[in-house]
Amino acid sequence: MSTTYNICLLPGDGIGPEIIAEGVKVLNAVGAKYDTTFTYTEALIGGCAIDATGNPLPQETLDAAQASDAVLLAAVGGPKWDSTDSSKPRPEQGLLGIRKALGLYTNLRPVQIFEALADASTLKPEVVAGTDVMIVRELTGGLYFGERHRYYNEEGAGTDGAPGQRAVDTLVYSEYEVERIARQAFEIARKRNNKVTSVDKANVLDTSRMWREVVHRIGAEEYPDVELNDMLVDNTAMQLVNWPKQFDVIVTENMFGDILSDEASMISGSLGMLASASLGDGVALYEPSHGSAPDIAGLGIANPLAQILSVEMMLRYSFGMGEAADDIKRAVTKVLDEGWRTGDIKQATTPAEKLVGTTRMGDLVVAAL
């Protein structure tokens, strides 16, 4: 008997509508192959939602997301909505808001190198070959969700005593927030190579010292079979480009994870190759790790593979369709092995006839399925 899943689609801004269309194309191909029906509810988020409603996350969007079996998001943001005025809505508030509302406290970002793209990385092939890292990022705490304010201090804002602006962002974590993300990392490590690197700044920050204490307690009490190492965030940034194969699972707090995962994306040759899953206790959200790329929006040249690989993660984590997820992974690998490239992963040896746009790349993946 056919199974039906309802997916909330959030195309967002810039190249979002173009790449999400390719994700839907692949989902429909999977549905046909595995006797599964995917239905879709489309909603607004980010800049397009601000333009239409004045709100980057309208209540209708949140209702649609909560009523779905999973959420597939493309990208939000763009210079049109950039402002230093904290009173004005920003597209990113929609993304942070939906993560918080859905209780998505875990962000998974796999960083792996497709063999065909080893030469596309900015690092030497021998450095990146065989890299397979899972970054587990805490998603609903830290600086991005702490109290913040700006004010004008007449009595002196700086060391010179002169009046001026001051700004405050608060980095806060509770013990239970660290406990639950640590457990997620250890559980994932058990299914991989039983190794976790916990990243913090414990030589400076009290939140990091608590983070380290809690992660070690959870590891010792509940996961003694998993190897646990600590690494300072600045050293981690260096080690990721020095020898990324030393890592298996990296677990870290919100802002550190945001920065490190974008850095690590270049190991794969392009940010356009990096998918992500945001998980919690309810409806999960899947999205590429790249932005809305407004400079190429509408040109039909965006790389849809990160969006398609986000679909792969959706099938795996939300629907338990591991075989179908493996099919997508094999299809993407086959297309890359055959030499097909979008502009962001084009190599010096790529023939002109193998350079394709967004729609054609999606078609190739579907054909390989």
Image (cartoon, rainbow, N blue to C red):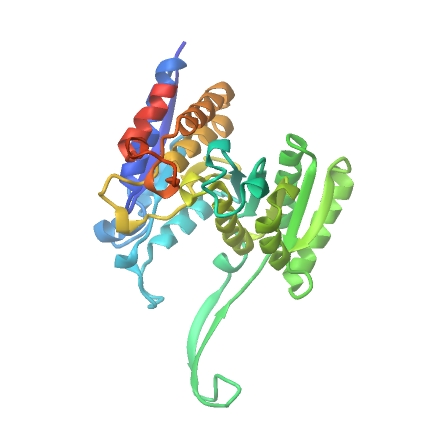
Residue 356 location (% of width, % of height): 29, 33
Residue 128 location (% of width, % of height): 56, 41
Residue 41 location (% of width, % of height): 30, 32
Query: Image check: 358 left or right of 155?
Result: left
Residue 39 in sight in this render? no
Residue at the extreme top of the image, as rendered: 1
Q: Is residue 264 above or below residue 323?
A: below
Query: Image check: 141 left or right of 86?
Result: right
Q: Is residue 199 above or below residue 31?
A: below
Which quarter of the figure is the N terminus placed in? top left
Going 49% across and 71% down the picture, which residue do you hit? 168
Q: Is residue 128 above or below residue 335?
A: below
Q: Nearer the viewer, residue 92 or 129?
A: 129
Going 41% across and 14% down the picture, which residue do you hit? 34
Residue 306 in sight in this render? yes
Residue 283 location (% of width, % of height): 45, 35
Q: Is residue 207 above or below residue 180?
A: below
